[in-house]
Amino acid sequence: IKDALPGYLEFIGEALAVGHNVPFDVNFIYDNSVDWLNLPFTNNFIDTMRLSRKLYKETKGHRLGDLARRFGIPDNGMAAHRALADVIKTHHCYEYMKRAAKSDPLLNKRLKDQDMFPAHKQLQFNWVTL
């Protein structure tokens, strides 16, 4: 981790981190950034699983594969739970939910009514109004 982390942090810069079911991953990056580099990881992030649970409360199944099937995102022959395949699916699911929330007043209201990002309220506002 001490060899790979500096390259990852340089790559991501100050960009928004988007992932599926990411609290563990973000905490792992944060802890190791502090432990190995003495630098906190301060990037904002969006968890597409949590986002899906807020937008589609009435729906069961918020795993990445569930979302991809529901949103009609093809797997393009890529195996599930492989890093690149999961990144591509997560990106498409995030973009789908972003478009849906922008165009559907009910979904947009659900985001505004929920405190999705308590530490980053400005991020929620910016996302909803994209």
Image (cartoon, rainbow, N blue to C red):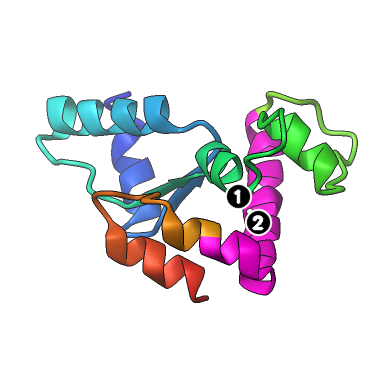
Task: State the CA–CA distance, disc 1 to disc 2.
Answer: 8 Å
Percent coordinates x, y for residue 77 in the rendering: 90, 34
Residue at 62%, 40% (x, y): give it.
57
Tell us which disc is closer to us: 1 or 2.
Answer: 1
Given contact means CB atoms under 8 Å apart, are the residues at marks 1 and 2 in contact?
A: yes
Looking at the image, which is closer to me, 44 or 71? 71
- The amino acid marked with disc number 1 is Leu
Residue at 68%, 49% (x, y): give it.
93
Left or right, residue 126 beside residue 34: right
Residue at 32%, 34% (x, y): give it.
5
Magenta: main secondary structure equals helix
22 magenta-colored: no
- The amino acid marked with disc number 2 is Met
Identify the disc placed on residue 55: 1
Is disc 2 placed on a helix, strand or loop?
helix
Q: Residues within 10 Å of mark 2 (few under 14, many from 20)?
A: some
Q: Residues within 10 Å of mark 1 (few under 14, many from 20)?
A: many
Identify the disc placed on residue 97: 2
State which tag comes first along the sequence, 1 or 2: 1
Is disc 1 placed on a helix, strand or loop?
helix
Q: Which residues are magenta?
A: 83-109
Left or right, residue 71 beside residue 9: right
The quarter of the displayed image where residue 60 is located = top right
Left or right, residue 96 beside residue 69: left
* In the image, residue 73 above or below residue 23: below
Percent coordinates x, y for residue 113 in the rendering: 43, 58
